[in-house]
Amino acid sequence: MDDRKHFLFLNIGHFLDHLFVLIFATVAALVLASDWGFTYAEFIPYATPGLVAFGLFALPSGWLADRWSREGMMVVFFIGIGFASVLTSMAQTPVQIAFGLFLIGMFGAIYHPVGLAMIARGGSSMGMDIAVNGVWGNMGVGCAALFTGFLIDQAGWRAAFWLPGIFSVLVGIAYYYSYRNRVPLKNAATESVAEHSSGADTTFNATEMRSVLIRISAIIFFTTAVSSIIFQGTTFSLPKVFDERLEGIAPTATMVGWLAFLVFAVASFAQIVVGKMLDGYGPRGVFAVVAIIQIIFFSLMPGLSDWNALAVALGFMLGAFGQIPINDYMIGKMAKSELRASIYGTRFIVSFVVWATVVPLIAWVHHNWGFDVLFYILAASAAVILCAVLMLPSRLPEAQAMPSHSPAE
């Protein structure tokens, strides 16, 4: 399988991963809660098992990919999450929905530690490669709202699960037939679509390297946790925010889905700009600018409606999506190839466990105070990130490069 074809499959996987995880957010906001006799706040906690699984299974997925096959794990991802989504479409009770979402989360946990380990392998264009892959993921976020809103109006909520489920299974079969003749399979774990970096960074001596690595690692995992509050708080709640605040311009589920999609789609391209800047300037300054953008627009959102709310939502989503590639870039620069999937797995355990706690937080905040308080919480989270980012060094140490392999070998 050549590099570009492989990269396309990985991008499609990222798209599907985020789409599947957020189908329920739109279904719950627009139809299921009322149809099944729940309030929005009562119903959305049923998403928690899936989000817990999305984090819990990330580390074992990365560990298994490092020791078996990253390509094999991607086949399991595509086919497993597809069948899980089809099963979820058959649910008759909230508990059955929760079980289906758990399976979606379990298979969805494979993608980030495995797919990113195949993309983030160093080289002068690594920031852009991660950013392009991130755009595909965020288009999945946007299409979850768009496709689900459209299918609710045209075919019912069940189709929003089983249609992409069947598509994912077909992609998994195509991916398997594309890579199955690769030899040797078990040695494919260190391969990637990106170039290797030319060697270790010799700017730091051994003592300085240890100190810097500890500091950067702490900042990465801390900002991962806090930025996950922002990402989940925005992507999960935005369909409901638009449903409440854009009544003058979005009277139907389809219109809510379209506007959410447009915001997610346009904002996702912030990652391209961020990826280019990461390759040129490094993470500290870029991360600080992104955090400041979030602080400004989250603080402006309370009390707004219709066109003003739509414009400000686009502003804070530019910041929320723009921050996504930064921590992945830092890990890709510093982590050794043979450990990279496991490290990404650990990073996504942190990320998605926080996601799971944010879902009941959204429900609690919305029930007691509405979404204005949520936006103040998100602004404060961005301010905390800014403080942490200012402690990053101006230059990152790099791991010793492994010998280059072609993904076709």
Image (tube, helix red, strand yellow):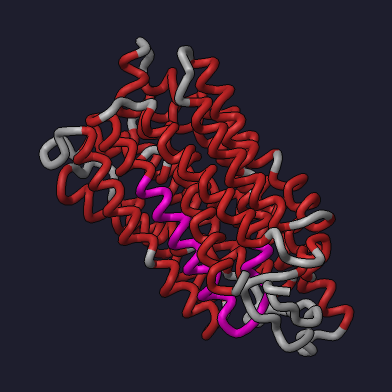
**Residue 21 higher or lower than 42, as above or below:** below
Where residue 225 sits: x, y (%)?
Answer: 61, 49
220 sits to left or right of 29: right
**What residue is at 53 percent from the left and 26 percent from the top?**
87
335 sits to left or right of 138: right
Which stretch is magenta? 116-143
In the rendered view of the protein, which quadrant contains the N terminus? bottom right
Where residue 408 sits: x, y (%)?
Answer: 68, 73
User: In the rendered image, is residue 4 in sight?
Assistant: yes
Residue sitting at the far right: 206
**What residue is at 37 percent from the left and 55 percent from the top?**
317
Quarter of the rendering containing residue 270: bottom left
**What residue is at 35 percent from the left and 51 percent from the top?**
298
Where residue 340 sits: x, y (%)?
Answer: 75, 63
User: In the rendered image, is residue 291 in sight?
Assistant: no
In the rendered view of the protein, which quadrant contains the C terminus? bottom right
